[in-house]
Amino acid sequence: MYLPAIFDRTAAQLNRIGDQLLPLLARLVFAGVLLGYFWKSATTKLGDGIFGIFTPSSGGYVQIFPRAMEAVGYDTSQLSIFHWAVVFAGTVAEFVLPLLIVTGLLTRLAAFGMIGFIAVQSLTDLYGHGGIAHEGTLGAWFDRVPGDLILDQRAFWVLCLAILVVKGAGAISADRLLFRNAP
């Protein structure tokens, strides 16, 4: 009887600590592993000058619309305002959403947005850049082969972000300071 009571008390205490610590650790891991990745990717989409965000580089279009760019001979002037808007929005998202996650501001919304961003990014990598044509690129769960397999790797990214969607920002966050009902 004594051992189950100790286990129950310990588990309850770990649950309370975990509700604050797990999201904080998820944000820390995101900062250490993915913040630089997404910001570096965003900078490759910037055009020249101080207002380069409004004139995306041709590389930005190639990253997001590889087949469309190939079809127009890599001449961005032949693409539509839709293409510009998507590249612009993607660039802004790669800067803003990771910053919101790391600071813990509007964390659930930012993490949910990043999950959507990663889904679109993965589909573009697989279909737009021909990743699906190469055997093994997708990855296969439970195959005991770790590495740079797109879906295997990005599943970890999404898990980290899903913790933030479900649990919020946790301790030491802007959400905690600004919103009364933040966990």
Image (cartoon, rainbow, N blue to C red):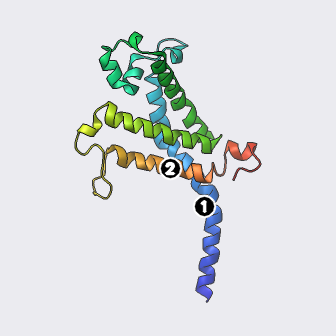
- Location of residue 102 in the rendering, given as x and y in whole percent from the top left corner: 58, 40
Q: Nearer the viewer, mark 1 or mark 2?
A: 2
Q: Please name whichever residue, 27 or 158, is drawn nearer the observer in this view of the structure.
A: 158
Which corner quadrant holds the N terminus? bottom right
Q: Residue at x 55, y 43 (%)?
A: 112
Q: Is residue 122 above or below residue 59?
A: below
Amino acid type indicated by mark 2: Cys
Amino acid type indicated by mark 1: Gly
Alpha carbon separation for disc pair 1 and 2:
14 Å
| Residue extending farthest bottom | 1
Which residue was labeled with disc 2? Answer: 160
Q: Which class describes the residues within 10 Å of circle 1: few (<14), some (14-19), or many (20+)?
A: some
Q: How many marks?
A: 2
- Position of 131 with respect to 112 (left or right) is left
Q: Residue at x 59, y 53 (%)?
A: 166
- Position of 169 with respect to 94 (left or right) is right
Q: Is residue 171 above or below residue 60?
A: below
- Position of 173 with respect to 38 (left or right) is right
Q: Residue at x 36, y 46 (%)?
A: 151
Q: Please name whichever residue, 102 or 127, is drawn nearer the observer in this view of the structure.
A: 127
Mark sitting earlier along the chain (1/2): 1
Kindly state the secondary structure of the residue where label 2 is placed.
helix
- Location of residue 144 in the rendering, given as x and y in whole percent from the top left corner: 28, 57
Which residue was labeled with disc 1? Answer: 18
- Location of residue 155 in the rendering, given as x and y in whole percent from the top left corner: 42, 49
